């Protein structure tokens, strides 16, 4: 199972759920996002420099990593789906 590395990230969200996830982590300081349509070296280079130079970004990423450590996201998701399906079938 792949785990987060606890590293600051530059995100290029492509879909709505990615935008939502990126927003959540960006608010905590571990990610900076950039719309794909506006990616160029003039914007990306200083953003990468900032993410690497400011230790608060790495600290934020490590806090998020610790929050997810020991959790099996796939199993928790499957359980939530099964609970939802079971509740719907009982209500029907």
Image (spheres, rainbow, N blue to C red):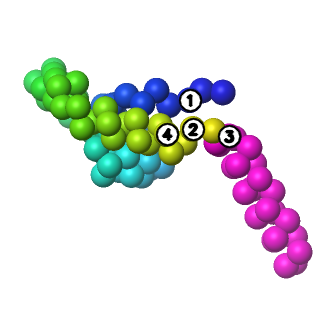
**Residue 75 at x, y = what percent?**
74, 43
Q: Which residue is mark 2?
A: 69
Measure the alpha-carbon separation of dots 2 and 1: 8 Å
Q: Residue at x 32, y 36 (%)?
A: 59
- CB-based contact (under 8 Å), mark 3 and mark 4: no
On the question of residue 90 being in view, the answer is yes
| Residue 3 marker | 1
Q: Is residue 84 magenta?
A: yes
Query: Which of the two discs, 1 and 3, labels the residue nearer the N terminus?
Result: 1
Measure the alpha-carbon separation of dots 1 and 4: 10 Å
Measure the alpha-carbon separation of dots 1 and 3: 10 Å
- CB-based contact (under 8 Å), mark 4 and mark 2: yes
Farthest bottom residue? 91
Compared to residue 14, the image places residue 86 above or below, namely: below
Q: Is residue 77 magenta?
A: yes
Measure the alpha-carbon separation of dots 3 and 4: 13 Å
Q: Residue at x 69, y 49 (%)?
A: 77
The residue closer to the viewer here, 54 or 40, is 54
Secondary structure at badge 4 equals: helix
- Mark 1 Cα-neighbour bin, 10 Å: few <14, some 14–19, many ≥20: few
Secondary structure at badge 2 equals: loop
> Magenta part of the protein: which range?
71-92
**Residue 27 at x, y = what percent?**
30, 51
Residue 73 sits in quarter: top right
Q: Which residue is mark 3?
A: 72
- Mark 4 Cα-neighbour bin, 10 Å: few <14, some 14–19, many ≥20: some
Secondary structure at badge 3 equals: loop
Q: Which residue is mark 4?
A: 66
Figure quadrant of the N terminus: top right
Secondary structure at badge 1 equals: loop
- CB-based contact (under 8 Å), mark 2 and mark 1: yes
Query: Which of the two discs, 2 and 1, labels the residue nearer the N terminus?
Result: 1
């Amino acid at each position: 199972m792949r785990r987060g590395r606890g590293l600051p990230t530059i995100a290029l969200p492509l879909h709505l759920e990615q935008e939502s996830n990126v927003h959540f982590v960006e608010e905590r300081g571990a990610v900076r996002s950039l719309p794909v349509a506006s990616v160029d070296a003039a914007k990306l280079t200083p953003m990468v420099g900032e993410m690497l130079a400011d230790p608060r970004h790495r600290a934020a990423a490590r806090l998020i990593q610790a929050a997810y450590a020991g959790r099996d996201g796939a199993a928790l998701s499957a359980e939530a789906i099964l609970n939802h399906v079971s509740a719907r079938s009982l209500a029907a």
